[in-house]
Image (cartoon, grey):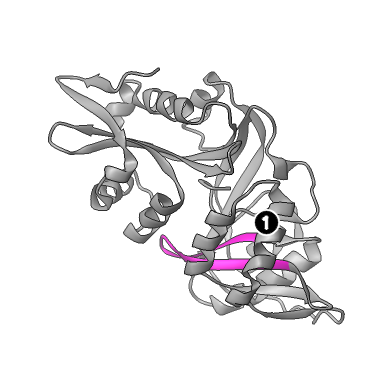
């Protein structure tokens, strides 16, 4: 059981439930390390996740680590942020031990930055692959011929049940709370055949502009079709999309319209591989976020 307190130079920080933290202080922490999250992005994370926050006696936030439950057996870990001072004293590992205590018995997945990779390896996580963060201002987009056998339309809330089912089929996890929270904040597209939804993509405000994700489809062709109108909608504006294959047609489309790779992170797991890394059909072509998968 990790200690609730942590000695930092001449004062002590204590691990608290993140639900008790002030969003403004969490925002100040992420801004301080150069992350682009807005207050609204933190509110979303607090709605769908749990975690611990390191606070000193005066209420200042020095670090945070979150986890996102999916059913009773699985979770992802994300939003691990520490001030340089806490990091230098091993605070990230201390916070991670709190999260691992809370998630004991679950299969875990996460996306690791280069700076955190050694820490996660030391905690037993295994490398699985790479996620490429594409972002930029959308430029010229190549046209896409219509799909003769399918209907492509704007997402509506009546599609929620079908989207939940597709997400469960692609990930193997019960993520309905995450999907519900995403749908409440997103616009998107769905592709259906004979009245059955077979692919979807969601887009929501995030950071410097908008982010696309998740994208779930039975084929890359269908993934391209649900993504295309969302990119068109962002012409001349900032957009982000995270993709798991730098040579895919999705990645080529992103590059063609000006979304270059800004960062590479490592997909990692603890317990067993993430369900959606096994080539399931339908497939998760783009995660909702690096924190939630």
Q: Secondary structure at mark 1?
A: helix
Specify the quadrant of the image occupied by residue 71: top right
Residue 7: x %, y % from top left: 23, 19
User: Could you say which is closer to the camera, residue 25 or residue 137?
Assistant: 25
Depicted 234 relative to depicted 242: above or below: below
Magenta span: chief secondary structure: strand
Residue 67: x %, y % from top left: 47, 39
Specify the quadrant of the image occupied by residue 278: top right
Residue 30: x %, y % from top left: 33, 46
Depicted 49 relative to depicted 120: above or below: below
Q: Which residues are magenta?
A: 199-215
Q: Is residue 126 left or right of residue 283?
A: left
Tally the numbered discs: 1
Q: Is residue 218 left or right of residue 213?
A: right
Q: Is residue 81 left or right of residue 103?
A: left
Tell whether position 42 is magenta: no
At x 78%, y 61%, the residue is 220
Q: Label 1 belongs to which residue?
A: 167
At x 40%, y 17%, the residue is 1
Assess disc 1: are there few (<14), some (14-19) or many (≥20) residues with their C-alpha within 10 Å of its C-alpha. Answer: many
Specify the quadrant of the image occupied by residue 284: bottom right
Residue 140: x %, y % from top left: 62, 76
Depicted 194 relative to depicted 224: above or below: below
Tell whether position 212 is magenta: yes
At x 57%, y 74%, the residue is 139
Q: Is residue 37 visible?
A: no
Name the residue at the front extreme. 72
User: Could you say which is closer to the camera, residue 86 or residue 283?
Assistant: 283
At x 22%, y 22%, the residue is 8
């Amino acid at each position: 059981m990790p200690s609730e307190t942590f000695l930092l130079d001449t004062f002590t920080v204590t691990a608290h439930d993140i639900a008790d933290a002030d969003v403004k202080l969490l925002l100040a922490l992420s801004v301080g390390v150069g992350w682009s999250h807005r207050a609204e992005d933190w509110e979303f994370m607090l709605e769908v996740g749990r975690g611990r926050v390191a606070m000193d006696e005066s209420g200042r936030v020095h670090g945070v680590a979150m986890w996102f439950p999916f059913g009773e057996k699985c979770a992802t870990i994300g939003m691990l942020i520490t001030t340089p001072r806490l990091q230098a004293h091993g605070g990230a590992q201390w916070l991670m031990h709190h999260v691992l205590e809370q998630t004991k018995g679950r299969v875990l997945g996460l996306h690791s930055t280069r700076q955190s990779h050694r820490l996660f390896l030391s905690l037993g996580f295994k490398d699985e692959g790479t996620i490429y963060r594409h972002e930029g201002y959308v430029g010229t987009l190549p046209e896409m011929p219509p799909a003769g056998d399918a209907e492509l339309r704007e997402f509506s809330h009546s599609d929620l049940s079908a989207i939940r089912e597709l997400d469960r089929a692609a990930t193997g996890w019960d993520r309905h709370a995450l999907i519900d929270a995403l749908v409440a904040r997103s616009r998107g597209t769905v592709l259906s055949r004979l009245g059955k939804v077979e692919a979807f993509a969601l887009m929501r405000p995030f950071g410097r502009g908008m982010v696309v994700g998740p994208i779930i489809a039975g084929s890359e062709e269908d993934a391209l079709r649900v993504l295309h109108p969302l990119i068109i909608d962002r012409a001349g504006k900032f957009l982000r999309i995270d993709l798991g294959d730098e040579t895919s047609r999705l990645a080529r489309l992103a590059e063609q319209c000006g979304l270059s790779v800004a960062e590479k992170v490592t997909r990692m797991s603890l317990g067993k591989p993430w369900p959606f890394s096994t080539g399931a059909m339908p497939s998760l072509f783009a995660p909702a976020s690096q924190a939630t998968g």
